[in-house]
Image (cartoon, grey):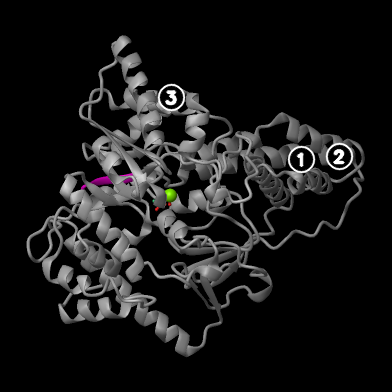
Amino acid sequence: MAVLHRPRVTITQMVAEDVNAELDRLREAVVGMRSALDEMLAAADVRDGGEHREILESYRMFADDRGWVARIGEAVHAGLTAEAAVQKVQDDTRARMAQATDPYLRERLSDLDDLGNRLIVHLSGGQTRPILPDPPVPIIVFARTMGPAELLDYDRKWLRGLILEEGSPTAHVTIVARALDIPVIGQVKDALARVEPLDAVIADGDNGQVFVRPTEDVRDIFATSMRGREARQASYLAMSNLPTVTRDGIGVPLNLNAGLLIDLPHLKSAGADGVGLYRTEIPFMVRADFPDVAAQADLYRKIYAAADGKPVVFRTLDVGGDKVLPYMSSAGDENPAMGWRAIRIALDRPHLLRQQLCALIQAASGARLDVMFPMVAEVAEFDAARAILDIEIERAAARGIPLPSPLRVGAMLEVPALALQLPALLRRADFLSVGSNDLIQFLFASDRGNPRLADRYDVLSPVILSFLHDLALRYSAAKVPLAICGDMGSRPLETMALIGIGMRSLGLRPLEVFLDSLYATSAHTIRDLLLAYARDHGVAV
Ligand code: PEP
Ligand code: MG
């Protein structure tokens, strides 16, 4: 059922009759709000450590900020009621928010805005609680935007989803929701205007769709697909301990993509061999400033501990483009995906890369270390990055830090030009990993984030498959491990095709022959043919 997040409080009295009484009310409400926040954060069953904790703690710190409370107090002294004073300070904050282009600052200002709302709720004696179903049933909460701690106001037992009119993948509330396994659909225009409290709602997080007051037909379709999904999840879970081998006995390592500490428990639940891609930039994106070597090493040590002996491929910072660090000025690129990002920044600002590599070496503390450089377009860039790593290894040796062993250095293959330099690359890299998300957007010159283009090209087109097939053949001849870390490797039918084209040292023979016959077709996609093949061979996709 739909729950509309805290409809706005209407403030009826703006002018204070008794300033001292208003100041008392304000003080009381601030104390009440702080202790309620403490209780809520202590009770939140978010796992210890991690970025979501950092977010919640810094949010809590704002509540103690004397400057903020003092400004509200000044407005009361000037003659406003406590509620009106909070609103005045909130208006100022919103005006600053509207001007802020810096995403980190915007997030922080929105935390403050959120605290203002919370304080008004305390002043009004809590009469703004949202309308909740009674007796309780599963709910989907609708909001324009929401602070990270507000999500914790809702009973986790019943909370099934969050629909935001604003919101982005890196918004604090989204990160906290992720930590709690609550699906979020963001950027849903006019969501609040289209729903009434306690309406029946279906939220389809996979496709980013929300159905308000769905018809019987739609409900039935979703009920069936939910049952299918649950059955599929249960069957995946039951299989998670089985070895990942094909029917004809070829081992295919299964790795996880991760970007937050909280992703790592999935290593065990999915029965994965390791982390094939750890996107190190995500923790950098939620911070106020660039973490120093000690802070980075601390985080990487936690990742090692959580991986519990399984290998983790650390990708060095892939910032720039759409992954903006609030404390680093953006290049203002016209084509950010093709702009000053990833290894290009790392080579122009080597101290950033050096610090990160130094932290990784410290965290490895003599154990295995896998480092991967993103967006390499030329072998010379790989060499330059590798040379920086060698210097850091020498420094660590001079300081008596145990050196990583083995040390494996790889590159992401996501810029098509790199595929044209394979012989030189294969002599240098210990492993390569295809970043199919970027590779495909560059091969087709088609923005990966543009929904209008989402269906224009298919990853199962003969063009892409024959391109990857060719790569795989050359890798297996050179005996350099080739993995795939783009999203393509996370979908069953696509995975079947990848195994078939030989994305391992050996392919799946019958499927390999079937695919061989298809590379030369000029079809838009061979998805249907692969589906039919899967069906004919009893492969669940
Ligand atoms: C890719 O490009 O396929 C990839 C895995 O990297 P990201 O999605 O982080 O750009
Ligand atoms: Mg990429």
Q: Residue furthest left?
A: 249
Q: Earlier in the sequence, mark 3 or mark 2?
A: 2
Left or right position of 389 against 188: left
Tag 3: amino acid: Arg
Give the camera-side residue of 275 and 197.
275
* Residue bearing mark 1: 26
Specify whether residue 274 is painted magenta: yes
Residue 297: horizontal and vertical position, in percent?
39, 26
* Residue bearing mark 3: 354
Specify whether residue 345 is painted magenta: no
Residue 239, by quadrant, is bottom left
Give the residues drawn in magenta, as a range. Answer: 273-277
**Does the beta carbon of the residue at mark 1 sit less than 8 Å from ligand 1?**
no
Name the residue at 31% across, 48% down.
433
Name the residue at 29% across, 73% down.
520
The C terminus lies in quadrant: bottom left
Q: Is residue 156 visible?
A: no
Tag 1: amino acid: Leu
- How far apart are the alpha carbons under marks 3 and 2? 51 Å
Residue 21: horizontal and vertical position, in percent?
84, 40
CB-based contact (under 8 Å), mark 3 and mark 2:
no
Tag 2: amino acid: Val
Residue 181: horizontal and vertical position, in percent?
42, 56
- How far apart are the alpha carbons under marks 1 and 2? 9 Å
Residue 355: horizontal and vertical position, in percent?
44, 24
* Residue bearing mark 2: 76
